Amino acid sequence: MHLHQSGEDYLETIFLLLQEKGTVRSIDVAQRMGFSKPSVSRAMSILRADGYIEMAKSGSITLTEDGERVARAMYDRHQLITNWLTGLGVSPEVAANDACRMEHAISEETFACIKKYLGEQ
């Protein structure tokens, strides 16, 4: 199933929060992303129904294998593109913002070629 950019962003955010905090709840996602709790709750329902996350009765969120695969891919793309852009002289803040948009727009083929060009394979 193909996720929209927002779904990929949610999964990447959950992944990062899990790395930082160990446990994640919807309120953590809402605070990190600057979204309302109802918006995040709706997104979590969709991600759960699509098999990307699991939610415990306590409210803690975990990534499924598919969810973690997507989240890691987005995180890796984001990091590589951010580093590439800052290496070109783009300010870190602008590079991170641009990378966030670019990570969703480029194809697997283009990303693989960028990685190869940068010697990141």
Image: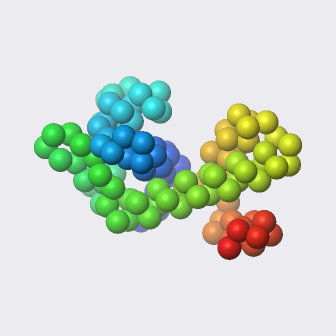
Where is residue 96 shown, x and y percent of the image?
A: 67, 41
User: Is residue 56 shown above or below 2?
Assistant: above
Where is residue 42 shown, x and y percent of the image?
A: 31, 39
User: Is residue 94 shown above or below 15?
Assistant: above
Residue visible at 32% across and 30% down in the picture: 27
Name the residue at the left extreme: 57
- Write down the quadrant of residue 17 in the picture: top left
Where is residue 100 shown, x and y percent of the image?
A: 63, 45
User: 115 or 3: which is nearer to us?
Assistant: 115
User: 47 or 27: which is nearer to us?
Assistant: 27
Compared across the picture, whether 31 is left or right of 76 comes to: left
User: Is residue 39 shown above or below 17?
Assistant: above
Compared across the picture, whether 87 is left or right of 78 comes to: right
Name the residue at the right extreme: 89
Q: Is residue 47 visible?
A: yes
Q: Is residue 113 visible?
A: no
Residue visible at 25% across and 53% down in the picture: 54
Residue visible at 50% across and 46% down in the picture: 9
- Write down the quadrant of residue 107 in the picture: bottom right
Residue visible at 67% across and 38% down in the picture: 97
Compared across the picture, whether 49 is left or right of 88 comes to: left
